[in-house]
Image (tube, rainbow, N blue to C red):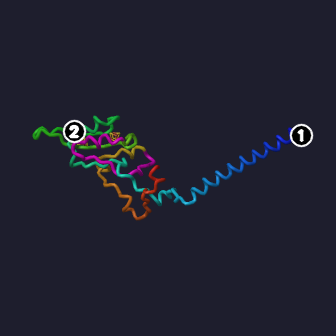
Amino acid sequence: MFPMLTRFLNSGQQTTRAARYIGQGFVITLSHANRLPVTIQYPYEKLITSERFRGRIHFEFDKCIACEVCVRVCPIDLPVVDWKLQTDIRKKRLLNYSIDFGICIFCGNCVEYCPTNCLSMSEEYELSTYNRHELNYNQISLGRLPVSIIEDYTIRTIFSNLPQLNNL
Ligand code: SF4
Ligand code: SF4
């Protein structure tokens, strides 16, 4: 008689626990009901990058004094500064400048320490290519002004003012 009663009580407790778990699940589901969707339909929708975003580096050839500080502060000695000394005016003349974005870790050291501010980090992040050698940007590619996401009429920009998106 007693074992049967114990089994009956146990099954009752299990049913109560299961009902409580289902209730908790429903409460969590309902708490998501009034939240806005966080999915971005890339590439038709894009988030506006934060002010400190470190994207493709922009380079201004005319401002560069070929001091090679950017090479010394780069953790992987990446920027290639090709210059020649003009003996008549005892000054370096910049010939070529390149950064390979296939290797760059976008740490921003070169931008931070450049004495003439000729380097800056843009908001451009779509650098993918089928050939890794195309990621080696010379001064012409580096000098190209980045396309602002806001000015691109083909996409919808999303302000990341939602708390869920700010945590991305
Ligand atoms: S630190 Fe700036 S000025 Fe000096 S070589 Fe690099 S880019 Fe040019
Ligand atoms: S961002 Fe960093 S890794 Fe890339 S070139 Fe500048 S210093 Fe080097």
Three-letter amino acid code of the residue under disc 2: Cys
Q: Could you tell me residue 167's position as x and y percent?
A: 46, 49
Name the residue that disc number 2 marks. 67
Name the residue that disc number 1 marks. 1
Q: Residues within 10 Å of mark 2 (few under 14, many from 20)?
A: some
At a point 28% along the width and 37% down the height, the residue shown is 71
Q: Could you tell me residue 149's position as x and y percent?
A: 38, 58
Residue toward you, 30 or 129: 30
Q: Residue furthest right?
A: 1
Three-letter amino acid code of the residue under disc 1: Met
The answer to whether mark 1 is within 8 Å of ligand 2 is no
Residue 147 is left or right of residue 28, and the answer is left
The numbered disc on residue 131 is none
**Where's the N terminus, which quadrant?**
top right
Residue toward you, 60 or 39: 39
| Prevalent SS, magenta region | loop
Residue 30's place in the image compared with 74, above or below, is below
Magenta highlight on residue 125: yes
At a point 14% along the width and 40% down the height, the residue shown is 91
The answer to whether mark 2 is within 8 Å of ligand 1 is yes
Please provide the residue range marked out in magenta. Answer: 107-131
Residue 17 is left or right of residue 95, and the answer is right
Residue 129 is left or right of residue 109, and the answer is right
Residue 153 is left or right of residue 14, and the answer is left
Q: Tag 1 or tag 2, which sits nearer the N-term?
A: 1
